[in-house]
Amino acid sequence: MQKAAQTYSTLLFLCLTLFTACVSEPADEKGLKDVSSFPVGGAVEIRQVMQDSALRDIILKNFNSITATSDMKMYAIAPRDSVYNWDKADSLVDFSQKNDLRLFGHTLVWHSGTPRWVFQKGAEDSLWLGNFLKTYIEDYVGRYKGKVAAWDVVNEGFDTQGGEYRETLWYNKLGKKYIANAFRYAHDADPDADLFYNDFNLERDTAKLNGVLKMIEELKADNVPITGLGVQMHLRMDIPDSLIRESVRKMAATGLKIHFSELDIIFNKHDDTRGGGEQLYSRVTPEMLEEQGQKYETVAKIYREEVPAEQQFGITFWDFTDRDTWINPFFSLKDWPTIYNSKLEPKPAYYGFRKGLSD
């Protein structure tokens, strides 16, 4: 009897051990890229990727596309007059090719990515600025021809709100034609690369969206080689799903490839300016995280349902962990906007998005 009891105890222990292992280790080890019909990506910084194995594992498991957060912006590539620094961009190209990841170039022209020395010279000499733009894009895109699949050619060329062009150095000195010229220069340097215009708030600011759509019509009518529209999708939980859906439908109607290029979803609010956060929630609850997961699921479904398959360039997360999110330092907030928590564990947002990819 004692021996039988010992045997029963041993079997019970083994069963409990196996049950615990099954619960703690998901049976389906596929990443997001494996359940998606279009590319899924993350924004990365090459130094952090090389130093943080946990972050690197998340990337390689879930993504088949990457975008540089800062390593490929103008201030990183052209830090001084007549000086290029290719080190980080070269490392990104090497990492992407070794791991079969599509590399998306972000960004060629952006007012906030323009280094101070370009502002100083360009403000004094518009002819020099126009020549610099041409040379810079031709050198840059030409160097990575066939290695960078697509580019955000111009980023945030419209005002934060409404449908007017943003009055930057580029616009004030060169006029709105700087946008068309930038696309032409990029196309000449790499005719096979997809070329995007990228901006924010397009999903919730109808006037801004209409302004961008009008610009796209004008560019296409003038045979400018624009092939894609990037919508950053820095969403808030309170933005109506119906508004997002209708906006995406309008974007898809352009016939361009559509890229949800910088996806995250916040609980709090901000006014789109540095330090302009409004802290509505001091802590996050399980219920809030579940609701965020449902929002991520809806965003994935809207993309699948409203963007024709041939126009689905993909969805990219702009930072994909709450530990690394740009939202908190930029807006002076404490928020939880990504699909992984600060411990690099998948949140309900991860599973919601995953469900939206394949449901």
Image (cartoon, grey):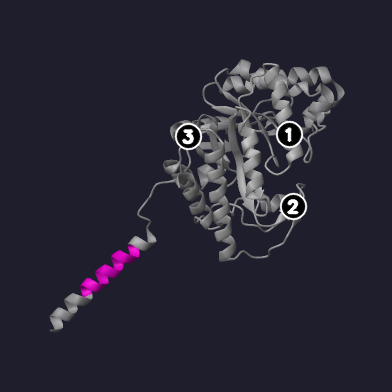
Q: Secondary structure at mark 2?
A: strand
Mark 2: which amino acid? His
- The CA span between labels 2 and 3 is 33 Å
Residue segment shown in magenta = 10-21
Of badges 1 and 2, nearer the viewer stands 1
Q: Are marks 3 and 1 in contact (CB under 8 Å)?
A: no
Mark 1: which amino acid? Asn
Report the side of 81 relative to 107 (left or right).
Answer: right
Reading the chain from its start, which is encountered first: label 2 or label 3?
3
Q: Does the rendering let one see residue 328?
A: yes
Instruction: Identify residue for label 2.
Output: 270
Of badges 2 and 3, nearer the viewer stands 2
The residue that appears at 70% across and 30% down in the rendered structure is 213
Q: Is residue 176 magenta?
A: no
| Residue at the right extreme of this rendering | 124
Q: Secondary structure at mark 1?
A: helix
Q: Main secondary structure of the magenta part?
A: helix
User: What label does residue 101 carry, if any?
Assistant: 3
Report the side of 97 relative to 123 (left or right).
Answer: left
Give coordinates of residue 285: x percent, y percent: 59, 66
> Between 248 and 116, which is closer to the camera in this rendering?
248
The residue that appears at 37% across and 62% down in the rendered structure is 23
